[in-house]
Amino acid sequence: MSTKTIHQSVVLRASPKEVYNTLIDSKKHAQFTSAKAKISKKVGGSFSCYDNYITGVNLELIDGKKIIQAWRCSTWPKDIYSIVIFKLSKAKQGKTKLEFTQIGVPTGDYKEKLSGWKTHYWKPLKAIFIKRR
């Protein structure tokens, strides 16, 4: 199967620790996505987001710095996973730079996922951190 890689970067008005916790905490994740999420906070633990549209396993978790997951969409062929990497670093004025990479996106779903991360993750994350300030 032919695949592509997505690279995106976003600056958020929150500390790296706040961003990390929002991504890895079931309740906080559900709050910014407005969809059910169940996320293990352990390496090897499973997760599901967007009412089971997204499922996978945590491969590496470094508190406040990095999340690496084997990630799949329910519409992908069975047993096809991509690798999702969220790297967090301090930016100016108490903000966080989130560098995102998704390796192994099926070519037929690339455009949808490319825009989907912006629409379904970065935009609502920006909005939730503005509300909290």
Image: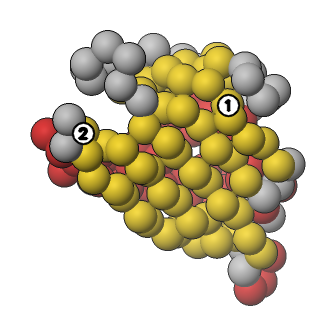
Label 2 with label 1: CB-CB less than 8 Å: no
What is the x, y in percent for residue 83? 50, 42
Name which residue lies at 74% across and 86% down.
92
Q: Is residue 69 above or below residue 46?
A: below
Q: Which residue is mark 1?
A: 58
Between 109 and 78, which is closer to the camera in this rendering? 78
Please tell me whether mark 1 sits on a helix, a strand or a loop.
strand
Q: Residue furthest left?
A: 108
What is the x, y in percent for residue 124? 49, 49
Taking the image as shown, residue 58 lies to the left or right of residue 79, namely right
Within 10 Å of the Cα at label 2, are there few (<14), some (14-19), or many (20+) other Cα atoms? Answer: some
Q: Which residue is mark 2?
A: 106
Tell me the quadrant of the picture where the C terminus can be found. bottom right
Q: Is residue 2 above or below residue 49?
A: below
* Marks 2 and 1, how far apart at CA: 20 Å
* Residue 74, quarter of the rendered image: top left
